[in-house]
Amino acid sequence: MQSADDHSIFSAYMAYRFSGFEHMAMSFDNMDRAILRLLKLNARRSNAEIAAEVGLSPSACHRRIRQLEAGGYIRGYTVVAGGRDDNSLVNVLVQVTLDRQTEDHLARFEHAVRQCPEIRECFLMTGAVDYWLRVEADSVDAYERIHSEILSRMPGVTRINSSIAMRDALRPRRNKG
């Protein structure tokens, strides 16, 4: 059991250790944007590399990254599993229109989307369609199965418009040969 003194020492340490983090939203600046941009491109970069690129000392850069994490600007780090040829997965951008846009209908649709691991991203939109999805499939035939057996049976779906991506234009092309 902690004594009152232990609790106050712990509280003082936590206040010191995390001081300033709660004000992160007010102090977000171009340096933070630069750090986020570099982490989005490659989150495995070392702190020293990021610090050198943005012109900070490694300790100042590390402190800013911790503040970005604590402030919710960095919610986590992820791995994009690969090892496959860039052309082996089919990326499909799917526009979905629902019959109604009530909170209940949106919630049921979003719950159904979460059950389908092939749906990699889902955005509630303004404009002519209700949702944009990004679906990854092993082939066009596999996407056809996802379309007919999963997407078209989701609650409230009245229209689906699919576009198959030819390639990711932001990634360098591999030489074939």
Image (cartoon, rainbow, N blue to C red):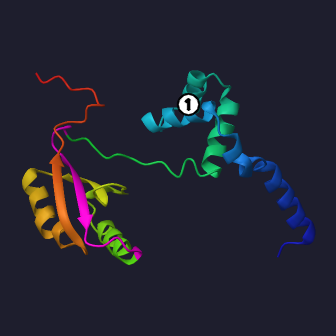
Q: Position of residue 44 (x, y in %)?
A: 47, 37
Percent coordinates x, y for residue 172 in the rendering: 27, 26
Regarding mark 1 in the picture, which secondary structure is present there? helix
Q: Locate the N terminus by quadrant.
A: bottom right
Please name the amino acid that badge 1 sits on: Ala
Q: As drawn, is 117 to the left or to the right of 13? A: left
Position of 66 with respect to 50 (left or right) is right
The extreme front residue here reads 128
Is any part of residue 13 visible from this angle? yes
Q: Which quarter of the image is occupied by the C terminus?
A: top left
The residue where tag 1 is placed is 34
Percent x, y of residue 27: 70, 40
Q: Tell which of 12 and 153 is nearer to you.
A: 153
Judge whether residue 42 can be spotted in this image. no
Please report the residue visible at 55 percent of the width from the left and 31 percent of the height from the top. Answer: 34
Is 59 in front, or is 41? 41
Q: Which residues make up the magenta segment? A: 85-103
Name the outermost residue toward the right. Answer: 5
Residue at point 65%, 44% (across, down) = 66
Q: For the point 43% across and 48% down, which residue is it?
A: 78
Magenta span contains residue 95: yes
Side (left or right) of 59 relative to 130? right
Side of 96 where 166 appears, left or right: left
Residue in the image at 38% along x and 78% along y = 104
